[in-house]
Image: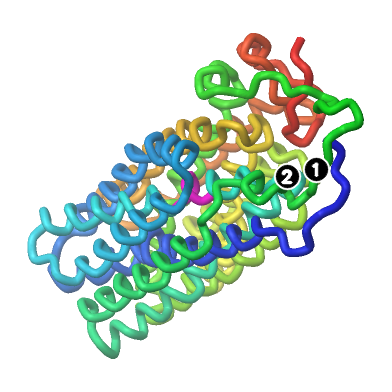
Amino acid sequence: MPLISRSPLFYGWRVVAVCFVAAVFTWGFGVFGASVYLSEVTRLRGWSVSLVSGAVTAFYLTNALSLTAIGSFVDRFGARPVFVGGALALGFGVASIGQVVAPWQLYATFVLMGFGYASLSLTGLTATIAPWFERYQGRSVAMALTGASFGAMIVVPLMVLAIGRFGFALTVLGGGGLTIAVLVPLALAVLRYRGPQELGLQPDGDIAMPSSHGAAENPPALPWTRATAMATVPFWTAAVGFALGLTVQVGFLTHHVKLAAPILGTVGAGWLVSATGLTGVLGRLWLARVADRVNLRRYTAGILTLQATVLALIALFPTAPVLIGASLVYGFCLGQITTLSPIVVRREFGAASFGAIYSVAATVIALSSAFGPGLYGVLHDLFGGYGPVLGIAAAVELAAMATVLAGHAPDAIPARQTPERSRSGRFASEGGGRQGKGP
């Protein structure tokens, strides 16, 4: 159908705004907050870094094992029930952290948080956004996930300041309550529609008119399915490449406060995490500007290489200036790597079954990255410091870069193809992820 105009107040941007707010809470109290929980629980309870890191690993493992179901659930039933359930699980989990008195309680609390994180992290948010945009798929996802950087920039320093004034238990109790009070009403009020078609619109807010022949001018070929996507090399190089990169990244974020505190002090480390979140905002805003215009695999490879470089610098020169400068550069990269994985999959495999397809890639990524905090903790205790750990992490980042590039093809945007052709893993010319005719 020809597109005749666009709605000036496209509802899809309201959906993006809700996802932005959800990302603030999810990453602020989940991913970045884990660094504060690690530092405070080890200090208050006297438990080892590796024991508490193991609880954070349980958080990520729970997330990983839930993602396939979450993606399929959003595709089938819409985002609203996923958001409400996720907000309740995350909020109650965060509120409970300050009450734990035994390791099993700590692990149970992080498992509960893991269910919330699975619902409100990459798979849930990007599957919610996917039906609403086509031309602006990269921009919309990048803008929504900018909330993750704001989570680090706002939530972590406020938590540190509140802990100093009110104590750890009361601070996390308030944070969990605020999560529920904000996210549940937003989900109920805004996430009423599953896509623009329910409003008589096309993706991006375009308004379609029937063609003069009374039928679509370019009938679509069969869309990708989970099985046909998993049969391609591009799918697995994206999944494995981002899995390696995010394993390093999640481990670094979890140990950031612990790593920086001996050099900058606890409060200084909290502000460094905040500043890292600020540069993450800048990185995601930059990605929103360029995502729909660049070769995403080459761009990803460049970001991974830069991350490897700054980790190596911290390992070799553990001084305040290097730590601060390298952390800020790492922050600029970290939000982009987190955001790029769904954008790559969305561009290369389309929107029709995005939740089901990306949930598989997200499960691989999450299962791998779940071990990041624990591996950092075990290696820290083994080597007696973070220097060797960061050196190993830099090498893994370079392996991630090579893996992402291994799936590269010229004009690396394949058309959505028929199942028969998709099994070959061959690419069509650049088409912005739009479906072309079958063979």
As displayed, is residue 352 above or below residue 281? above
Question: Residue drawn at (37%, 53%), measured in percent from left and top?
Answer: 117
The dot on residue 401 is none
Looking at the image, which is closer to me, 28 or 1? 1
Q: Give the magenta-colored segment's residue range.
A: 121-125
Q: Is label 2 in contact with label 1 (beta carbons under 8 Å)?
A: yes
Horizontal arrangement in the rendering, residue 364 relative to residue 330 (left or right):
left
| Residue furthest to the left | 102
| Residue 233 x, y percent position in the rendering | 59, 20
Question: Residue 356: x and y, percent?
Answer: 49, 32
**Quadrant containing the N terminus in the rendered view:** top right
The residue at which mark 2 appears reads as 202
Q: For mark 1, what is the residue?
A: 208
Where residue 376 appears, x then y in whole percent?
34, 50
Taking the spot 68% from the left edge, 62% from the top edge, the residue there is 285
Residue type (three-letter) at the residue carrying disc 1:
Ala
**How many neighbours does mark 2 have within 10 angstroms: few (below 14), some (14-19), or many (20 or more)?**
many
The residue at 80%/43% (across/down) is 208
| Real-space CA distance between mark 2 and mark 1, rounded to the nearest whole angstrom | 7 Å
* Residue name at image x 77 percent, y 22 percent: 219
Three-letter amino acid code at the position of disc 2:
Gln
From the viewer's side, name the closer residue of 109 and 204.
Answer: 204
Compared to residue 226, the image places residue 283 above or below, namely below
Q: Is 227 in front, or is 100?
A: 227
* Dot placed on the residue nearer the N-terminal end, 2 or 1: 2
